[in-house]
Image (cartoon, rainbow, N blue to C red):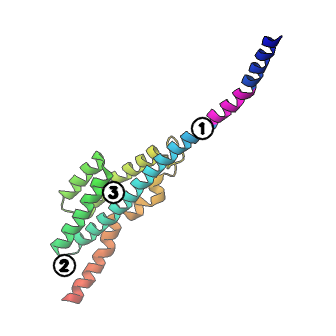
């Protein structure tokens, strides 16, 4: 009888412990998945931040290149900042697109072509990092939310070309 009681107690302990262990493992796996997703999103947000800096520096380069009275040192400094931003993105496609822009004459069409390529990059970043809702469903993506179409340097060229013309008239 004593050994039967020991088996019943052991079985009762196992039956009561098993759900507790299963629930603990279930929650731990869920928490680990949420942590991994948050880290992936954080990497995506870092990419967005680097992209924002690149966009600002490329726009500054577009402004400097479009203004005839801007010193070459200003254009070189803007190009150096853009070089550093491209290196920070650490992406071969972005680097290739940047090299083709860098070796061009820095016309409005060259900048527009660069940002068309960057649009694909930012969409892929959103999909990889989980910052878009569902990459399989077409719709609003990270590029749309950042307003990439409105940040293209063609806008900068048009706006700052007018400023440069006015500034040149004032200097003369």
Residue 83 in picture, x, y percent from top left: 24, 58
Compare marks 3 and 1 and give the one earlier in the sequence. 1
Q: Are marks 2 and 3 in contact (CB under 8 Å)?
A: no
* Residue at 74% in and 20% down: 10
In this picture, residue 92 sits left or right of residue 127? left
Which numbered dot is residue 115? 3
Number of the front mark, 3 or 1? 1
Q: What secondary structure predominates along the stretch shown in magenta? A: helix
For disc 2, the neighbor class at 10 Å (few under 14, some 14 to 19, many from 20) is few
> Label 3's element?
helix
For disc 1, the neighbor class at 10 Å (few under 14, some 14 to 19, many from 20) is few
Work out which quarter of the rendered image holds the C terminus and state it. bottom left
Residue that label 1 marks? 28
In this picture, residue 140 sits left or right of residue 154? right
Q: Which residues are magenta?
A: 16-26
Residue that label 2 marks? 69
Residue 66 in picture, x, y percent from top left: 24, 71
The vertical placement of 128 against 7, above or below, is below
Q: Nearer the viewer, residue 28 or 71?
A: 28
The vertical placement of 16 against 97, above or below, is above
Q: CA distance from mark 2 to mark 1?
A: 62 Å
Residue 114 in picture, x, y percent from top left: 29, 55
Q: Nearer the viewer, residue 1 or 152?
A: 1
Compare marks 2 and 3 and give the one earlier in the sequence. 2
Residue 79 in picture, x, y percent from top left: 22, 64
> Label 1's element?
helix
Q: Are marks 2 and 1 in contact (CB under 8 Å)?
A: no
């Amino acid at each position: 009888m004593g050994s039967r009681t020991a088996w019943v107690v052991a079985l009762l302990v196992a039956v009561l412990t098993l759900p507790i262990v299963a629930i603990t493992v279930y929650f731990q796996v869920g928490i680990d998945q949420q942590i991994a997703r948050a880290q992936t999103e954080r990497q995506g947000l870092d990419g967005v931040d680097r992209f924002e800096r690149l966009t600002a520096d490329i726009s500054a380069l577009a402004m400097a290149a479009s203004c005839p009275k801007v010193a070459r040192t200003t254009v070189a400094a803007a190009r150096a900042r853009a070089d550093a931003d491209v290196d920070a993105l650490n992406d071969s496609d972005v680097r290739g697109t940047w090299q083709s822009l860098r070796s061009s004459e820095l016309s409005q069409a060259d900048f527009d072509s660069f940002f068309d390529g960057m649009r694909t990059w930012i969409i892929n970043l959103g999909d990889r990092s989980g910052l878009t809702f569902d990459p399989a469903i077409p719709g609003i993506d990270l590029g749309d939310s950042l307003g990439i179409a409105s940040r293209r340097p063609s806008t900068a060229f048009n706006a700052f070309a007018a400023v440069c013309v006015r500034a040149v008239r004032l200097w003369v």
